[in-house]
Image (cartoon, grey):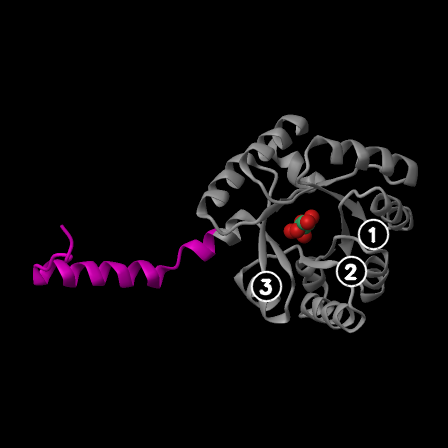
Amino acid sequence: MELFIDSADPKEIQTAWDWGFIDGVTTNPSLAAKVGRPYRQIVLQIFEIVDGPVSLEVIATEYDQMLEQARALAALHPVVVVKIPCTRDGLKAVKTLKKEGIKTNVTLVFSGGQALAVGKLGSDYVSPFVGRLDDIATHAGDDLVSNIRQTYDRYGFGTKILAASIRDLQHLEKMALIGADVATVPFNVLETITNHPLTDKGLQRFLQDWQAAGLELPIE
Ligand code: E4P
């Protein structure tokens, strides 16, 4: 399973990237707005940090403008995956972009029907929004990802399932069990992977015992 960081903040991305287990980045317009700096400056900085896929989202809502923006974003750097909203114009744009060899990530996916269309179009990624669905009905997010997994496996679709809108460690662990190909995880949730109070407590005890016994490692 691949893990992406769901952030547009270069500082967070650098910190998480240095942990060594992050494979890529997803951004969206809201995340970019939070950083408070020009978007171009931010993305160029992100390209210097990561060498995995970086999802950048179009802002246009109509086919022709989506294509223009997608081509310009893709030309920025080879790691760019263009995020396209799951609308009629968006799906049409995915078909064209695929023919041009531009990588796509279809975002704002909330139903199995939407995911089926995305799989048939051969988008590189489909992004079901787990947390936002769970806000409406418990386990709705898990159920959707599980349905998409079964459908894609049954028909052999190559589109990677990128579980988005992950709110906590339970969401992430559920996505791993279901078999999402990727989960994109916000920095605060990634921090909970890298810091467990029982790990800290256990380590403190090991070191205390070691020191109390006056032991030394068998190395020069
Ligand atoms: C990532 O691709 C999505 O845009 C993001 O995970 C949405 O998360 P949110 O529902 O917490 O805003």
Task: State the residue at coordinates (16%, 54%).
Answer: 219
Mark 2 close to ligand 1, CB under 8 Å: no
- Amino acid of disc 2: Phe
Which disc is residue 110 wearing?
2
Residue 52 placement, left or right of 161: left
- Find residue 45 and report its horizontal and vertical position in percent: 58, 30
Label 3 – label 1 distance at C-alpha: 22 Å
At label 2, counting other C-alpha atoms closer than 10 Å, the crowd grade (few under 14, some 14-19, many 20 or more) is some
The reply to whether the magenta stretch includes residue 127 is no
Discs 2, 1 touching: Cβ within 8 Å: yes
Per the image, label 1 sits on a secondary structure element best described as: loop
Main SS, magenta residues: helix
Task: State the residue at coordinates (58%, 61%).
Answer: 1
Image label count: 3
Label 2 – label 1 distance at C-alpha: 9 Å
What residue span does the magenta drawing correspond to? Answer: 191-220
Residue 168 placement, left or right of 163: left
Residue 79 placement, left or right of 153: left
- Amino acid of disc 1: Cys
- Find residue 30 and report its horizontal and vertical position in percent: 69, 40
Name the residue beneath numbered marker 3: 171
Label 2 – label 3 distance at C-alpha: 16 Å
Per the image, label 2 sits on a secondary structure element best described as: loop
Q: Residue furthest left?
A: 214
Name the residue beneath numbered marker 1: 86
Mark 1 close to ligand 1, CB under 8 Å: no
Q: Quadrant of residue 153?
A: bottom right
Q: Residue furthest front?
A: 220
Q: Quadrant of residue 55?
A: top right
